[in-house]
Image: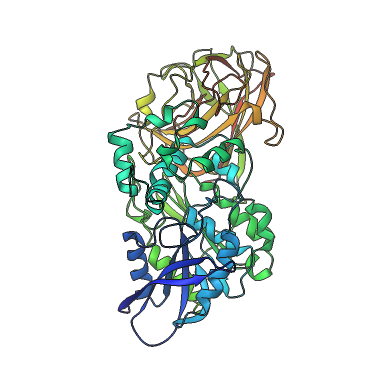
Amino acid sequence: MYETTLEADVEATMRDGVVLRADVYRPDVDGKFPVILERTPYNKGADRFHEKGSKLAERGFLYVIQDVRGRYGSDGEFMPGFFSGDHKDDVDGYDTVEWAAKLPWSTGKVGTTGGSYDGWTQLELAHTRPPHLRAIMPQLICANLLDREMSAVLRLGRVLWWSMNTLAPDQRVRDNFPTGSRTPDEAEELFVSRDRGKWYWYLPLMEIPDDAMYGIGPHWRKWLNDHATDHFDFEAKHRNMAVPTLTQTGWYDQQVMSVKNFTGLKENAATELARDNQYLIVGPWTHDGTEWPTKLGDMDFGPEAHLDYYDITAQWYRRWLHDEKDAIADWPKVRIFVMGDNTWRDEEDWPLARTRYVPYYLHSGGEAASVSGDGTLSEEPPGDEPADEYVYDPRDPVMTLYQQQGQHEPLDQRALDDRQDILRFATPPLEREVEVTGHIRLKLYAASTAKDTDFVAKLLDIWPDGFAQELCYGIVRARYRQSFDNPSLIEPGAVYEYDIAIHPTSNVFKPGHRIRLDVSSSDFPNFDRNHNTGGDDYADATLVTARQTVFHDAARPSHVILPIIPR
């Protein structure tokens, strides 16, 4: 463990002459060390980066944390990569890797780290293949933007919070704008105490005043106008990536579909070295890159749930930057935390090869819209059964239970028990353990009185004491049921089959627990409200109710397909 020192505001000139600045944390001794690079829009001087830099430098690395173009200490114009493909983070990333390799304290070997946007910057530079890049460690970032948004439905709660409270303050400071919050902490406090989340309800979303998200409004509106486009396109870019990759996410991370980076690179990366050295870690965590706690929301997953980010990162980069071939010799290719058992398990692939995909069919006598109703879930196909109905009113949506910042965690869903616009289908108390690990799909036969509407599905573990643990969810917007490129409205009253992708999970349902599937038409503000008009929900303020009908009979056997792992 080294003593460390900091070289602040080290300048790097990009190919177009724009100067970006980085803080370099290094061991305070003579000699050269490999680089772990992170590129961020979140202020390189923040306390969390100071902690990360100190701890990685202690372990024998140069930690280089750079403000991306147009943010905090760096020059140029900021172009948010999540909102469009109009940015320079690919070439800036390439240039920064090559610059970092030539730092006077550097051995010339560079790896990368960081989560969410800082994971996105890694994948954006990896496909440009800078010569000195040896490995990457992208966390909490999807391979496909539409997997993050799930069926091209705007993740309003997170994206609006991010735009107003995380991105906008620095834009005010850079332009010396006289009013408004100057730091993310100040912006968040005002959002909660003064505005009380009013912007989630603002209609139309396209007309949120620019002052509310200073400097970000044009990017916001551009994204709303082009929201069904995959601006990431990493699945196509995988074939140009040629480095070993450690992918990390959490079961409660909104970007848990990061798993597609593991599977895509394992199959399609440009070199055999890269294809053979793909690793995946999925824990019982939310959208958090370094804490990896044992407790989340209303759940305590036990002491084994904790892993140490710094130990994992140091092992990974001792292998690829220090060339210590034994550093990760005992690592499995896939390491997942199995909830319920509350233990880590080593696997060699994802999805698990031994998975049995078992349909669980929806049943009821037409009274599933109540927590004490007659909705059931079983492996037996339905016969002649009445449909279930409920009314979805976008003025009174089902409210999301999650963190204030728009991140998910397992909170007791019994708070929604009085809602009559949620259909609930549950197994009887289980007599034996049932493990569900993998990707989940719902085949839903449904009709609506609207021209466009949403259907939301949630998988829950119902404990013997009634505690309702949400595991994962999915959504479909009717107009995108067949295509994102060519959306089409539905005919009111007509029955359609909807294929709803539900986020993957890993959970053992214990004896006495029940497996429950909830079906509704809103999850707000996690997702924006479908106005049910068939118009442009982002430009139009009109809201109408819709009567939804869910079928589960022999001709229309709605069912959820669960990935069952033999015990």
Q: In which quarter of the image is residue 244?
A: bottom right
Residue 509, percent across and down?
Answer: 45, 38
Residue 326, percent across and down?
Answer: 50, 77
Q: Is residue 141 above or below residue 299?
A: below
Q: Is residue 32 above or below residue 39?
A: below
Q: Is residue 139 visible?
A: no
Q: Is residue 124 above or below residue 152?
A: below
At horizontal 45% and vertical 29% (from top left) the residue drawn is 524
Would residue 187 be found to the left or right of residue 287 on screen?
Answer: left
Would residue 106 be found to the left or right of residue 150 on screen?
Answer: left
Residue 279, percent across and down?
Answer: 55, 62
Q: Which of 99 and 107 is in front in this view?
A: 99
Q: Is residue 366 visible?
A: yes
Residue 125, percent across and down?
Answer: 58, 63
At horizontal 44% and vertical 40% (from top left) the residue drawn is 158
Q: Quadrant of residue 482?
A: top right
Please tell me how many numbered marks the rendered image carries: 0
At horizontal 38% and vertical 37% (from top left) the residue drawn is 402
Q: Nearer the viewer, residue 218 or 505?
A: 218
